[in-house]
Image (spheres, rainbow, N blue to C red):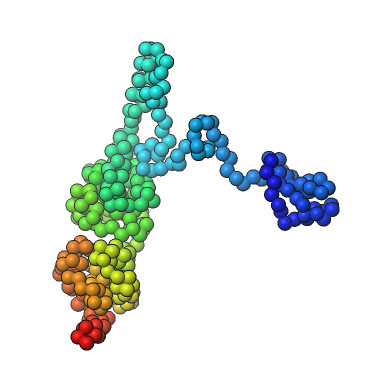
Amino acid sequence: MADEKYVKKCPECGSINLFWNRDRGEIICKDCGLVVEEKMIDFGQEWREFDQKGESKRRAGAPMTYTQYDQGLGTRVGTSSDLYGLGKKDRNKFFRLRKWQNRISTAIERNLKLALAELKRVGSYLKLPKSVEEEAARIYTMAVQKGLVRGRSMESVVAGALYAACRRHEVPRTLDELSEASGIEKKEIGRTYRFVTRELGMNILPSNPEEYIARFASALKLSPESQSKSIDILKKAQKAELTSGRGPTGIAAAALYVSALIHGEKRTQREVADVAGVTEVTIRNRYKELLAKLNLEKDIKKLKKKNKK
């Protein structure tokens, strides 16, 4: 029996010497014995453990997940250890049941079993969080059920679903990274992504260049000051409408390049372009636009004067 103090008074004798009987769901006064409250609801977890060997008190199995073709609801007929003590007839029956249980009945399930394995491989390569993999698996499952995979390679639809999930969860991954991980051309991934999102009625906002700053700055080993300055540059660029119609990775890389120059951290355009997955021409063009429209040349000139001194 567990007891717990309550800041309450007994309505009979006015005592605060109360205790909570968790087993009976009652609050009882220790002085006069009055049952102050009864039939209380226990909001704790209803733990049950049938296997005495288990350390954790399990109550149910794993939750449903779209990353498995049967959403994690399938069961196993048994393991090889269950064969101990069985006769030949029962053993044959056991193996026959396992064989039929491992067979997948429908074409959709067969497709999902192969595609979700590929999805996990690509997600692991890109180091994506579980929430993104779950969302991508859900998108792919909906695409298969609507027949959107017909006429397209399974790998391209998987890559398109992963890209859509990354955009939804604001996890910055470029088409070039997805192309490298999946082995599918960047144009094909983009085409499949647009087709799937349009057919499924998904509204996905354009990528924000600020989402790429942290990754690019970490790869270029830039200081926190340069990183925060590049975010300020991007905010000014958005107000000046310099980001509309331009690739988010290019404008983010150019903002980092300008910020690094202002803080005296020299990085070549080639280094920034390699990290961002864009060309040096793109960096150069966005760099010139930022300098011209945001009057950043003054900050760079001030830095040069300080270095000369």
Q: Residue at x 32, y 77 (%)?
A: 236
In x, y percent, where is residue 221?
26, 66
- Image-quadrant location for residue 176: bottom left
Q: Decide if residue 81 is on the left or right side of residue 16.
A: left
Q: Nearer the viewer, residue 95 or 239?
A: 95
Residue 221 versus residue 137 in the image, above or below = below
Q: Nearer the viewer, residue 20 or 205?
A: 20
Which residue is outermost to the top? 88
Q: Position of residue 200 (x, y in %)?
A: 35, 51
Outermost residue to the front: 309
Position of residue 245 relative to residue 262, above or below, is above
Task: Name the quadrant containing residue 88.
Answer: top left
Residue 219 visible: yes
Task: Report the residue at 18% width, 73% height from top.
Answer: 285
Q: Is residue 88 left or right of residue 274?
A: right
- Quadrant location of the C terminus in the rendered image: bottom left
Looking at the image, which residue is at 41% across and 15% down?
86
The quarter of the picture where the N terminus appears is: top right
On screen, 99 above or below 156?
above
Q: Is residue 200 visible?
A: no
Q: Nearer the viewer, residue 120 or 155?
A: 120
Residue 230: x and y in percent read: 30, 73
Residue 223 in percent (x, y) is at 29, 70
Q: Residue at x 30, y 48 (%)?
A: 124
